[in-house]
Image (tube, grey):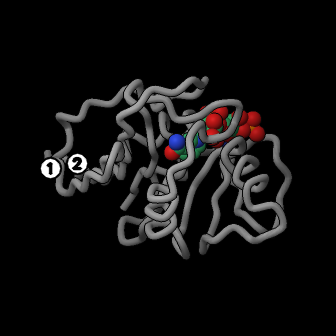
Amino acid sequence: MIKLIWAMDKNNLIGKENKIPWHYKKDLQYFKNHTQNQDVLMGKNTYLSLKTYYKDRPLPFKKIYVASNTLNDNNEYVLVKDLTNFLQNYPKEKDLFVCGGSMIYEKALEYADYLYVTKINEEYDGDAYFPYYDENNYNLIKQNDIDVLSFCVYERKKK
Ligand SMILES: NC(=O)c1ccc[n+]([C@@H]2O[C@H](COP(=O)([O-])OP(=O)(O)OC[C@H]3O[C@@H](n4cnc5c(N)ncnc54)[C@H](OP(=O)(O)O)[C@@H]3O)[C@@H](O)[C@H]2O)c1
């Protein structure tokens, strides 16, 4: 199952200068609860951003797939050069959390079985946006509202 996880503001903004523009402890905890010790996929920019955030600490995932055509191999991650092929052939019985950023969400959306989106009822400044998607293709299966945060889970409608 391919699961996209992200947080966005009212305008679908997700990032600024390769960082997250806000700091909500509850959302960080939510992200951690879902992705810790899980297999994750992210783009080069998000990976480098997380490395800055974690400094010398190891990233808390099981297996990390990093999409890039410029990074070198590294024993921390598995390099994904052909993202379409990777997503098309990802085993259905295994869970993969797609953790961004914009470019990777855009490619992964059509393969997404579940969307874990934290909607932030605020407006921020930034430069990276979640790509357009049609919520009508999904059923809302969970929603938990805490202050300005709305933690939503959507499941793709069966065809
Ligand atoms: N709010 C949230 O939940 C959230 C979550 C994650 C990230 N973000 C934010 O999103 C922003 C980063 O997004 P971004 O779009 O700039 O970067 P990104 O998606 O993290 O990474 C982009 C890089 O991925 C590689 N890539 C893209 N398409 C590929 C493909 N088809 N095949 C192989 N590699 C591919 C390329 O690396 P090469 O140039 O090396 O080829 C590209 O430069 C940051 O501001 C970050 O903080 C927000």
**In percent of the image, x 73 and y 55: which residue is there?**
53
Q: Is residue 84 visible?
A: no
Q: Nearer the viewer, mark 1 or mark 2?
A: 2
The kind of residue tagged 2 is Arg
Q: Position of residue 96 (x, y in %)?
A: 47, 62
Q: Is residue 71 above or below residue 54?
A: above
Q: Secondary structure at mark 2?
A: strand
- Residue type (three-letter) at the residue carrying disc 1: Lys
Image position of 29 (left or right of 52): left
Please give left or right for residue 139 compared with residue 36 in the image: left
Q: What is the spatial separation of the Cα atoms under label 1 and label 2, in whole angstroms?
A: 6 Å
Quarter, ligand 1: top right
Please tell me how crowded label 1 is: few (under 14), some (14-19), or many (20+) other residues with Cα within 10 Å: few
- Residue extending farthest front: 147
Q: Is residue 15 visible?
A: yes
Q: Is residue 66 above or below residue 43?
A: below
Residue 55 x/y as whole percent: 81, 61
- Residue 16, percent from left and from top: 64, 31
Instruction: Note whether 88 is above or below 125 in the view shown.
Output: below
**Beta carbon at label 1 within 8 Å of ligand 1:** no
The picture quadrant where one finds residue 54 is bottom right
Q: Quadrant of residue 19?
A: top right
- Disc 1 target residue: 158
Q: Secondary structure at mark 1?
A: loop
Name the residue beneath numbered marker 2. Answer: 156
Where residue 89 appears, as percent x and y from the top left, is 47, 56
Proximity of marks 1 and 2: CB atoms separated by less than 8 Å: yes
Foreground pick, 15 / 67: 15
Dot 2, crowdedness within 10 Å: few (<14), some or many (≥20)?
some
Nearest the camera: 69 or 29?
29
Residue positioned 45% across, 26% down in the render: 123
